[in-house]
């Protein structure tokens, strides 16, 4: 991996953390997509040999601290999400954009369900919104993927 690719990856992760914590107006607060999940999806689909399940540990712990969640919550959900994404990677690269977005939306639903089950196992009164991240991901995914492909082609990110 070149120095340019490493710095671009760190820039993507930094941007993802900033966007994840970006305050939104009350009227648009339901539209806050899971930015780090989207950026991890883009990176895993782009270079699955570099970005694997190992990414879930540092990013998950940082997300746990940032969102004031139980320690290990995001590590668990990201590990399952990335493992499913890598298992489907060879088939996903042959899909068109619409089918790929449907698969990504389904994976976000699985991520939210695993998060709900994990929080339910620890305490009975916690709830993770399932459909809000799914709707916002559906609206943003194709735009974000097109932007990512433009950026990676300009930076020769391989």
Image (cartoon, rainbow, N blue to C red):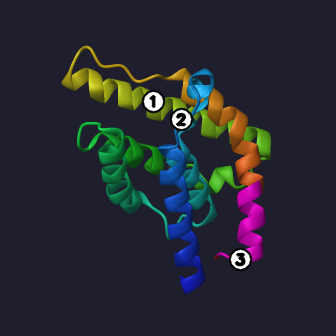
Judge whether residue 156 is colored magenta.
yes
Residue 33 sits above or below residue 152 on the image: above
Which numbered disc covers residue 108?
2
Front residue of 51/71: it is: 71
Quadrant of the image occupied by residue 47 = bottom right
* Residue positioned most to the left: 122
Contact flag, marks 1 and 3 (Cβ < 8 Å): no
The reply to whether callout 1 and callout 2 are in contact (CB within 8 Å) is: yes
Residue 2 in view here:
no
Q: Is residue 66 left or right of residue 81?
A: left
Image spot of residue 77 (x, y percent): 38, 40
Of labels 1 and 3, the one closer to you:
3
Name the mark on residue 155.
3
Distance, label 2 to label 3, CA atoms, is: 28 Å
Whole-percent x, y for residue 143 in the image: 76, 46
Mark 1 sits on what residue? 112
**Which of marks 3 and 1 precedes in the sequence?**
1
Query: Is residue 116 rendered to the left or right of residue 50?
Result: left
Task: Provide residue 70's location: percent of width, then percent of height.
Answer: 24, 37
- Mark 2 Cα-neighbour bin, 10 Å: few <14, some 14–19, many ≥20: many
Badge 3 marks a residue whose secondary structure is helix
Label of residue 136 in the image: none
Q: Is residue 69 visible?
A: yes
The chief SS type of the magenta part is helix
In this picture, which residue range is highlighted in magenta? 147-157
Label 2: which secondary element:
helix
Residue plotted at (49% across, 23% down): 130
Closer to the chain start, of discs 2 and 3, is: 2
């Amino acid at each position: 991996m070149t120095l340019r690719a490493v710095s671009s990856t760190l820039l993507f992760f930094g941007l993802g953390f900033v966007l994840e914590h970006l305050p939104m107006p009350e009227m648009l607060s339901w539209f806050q997509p899971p930015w780090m999940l989207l950026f991890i999806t883009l990176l895993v689909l782009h270079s699955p040999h570099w970005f694997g399940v190992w990414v879930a540990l540092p990013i998950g712990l940082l997300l746990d601290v940032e969102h004031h969640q139980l320690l290990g919550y995001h590590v668990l959900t990201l590990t399952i999400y990335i493992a499913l994404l890598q298992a489907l990677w060879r088939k996903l690269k042959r899909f068109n954009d619409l089918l790929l977005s449907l698969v990504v939306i389904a994976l976000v639903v699985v991520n939210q369900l695993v998060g709900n089950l994990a929080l339910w196992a620890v305490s009975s009164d916690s709830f993770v919104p399932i459909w809000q991240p799914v709707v916002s991901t559906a609206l943003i995914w194709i735009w974000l993927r097109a932007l990512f492909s433009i950026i990676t082609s300009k930076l020769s990110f391989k």
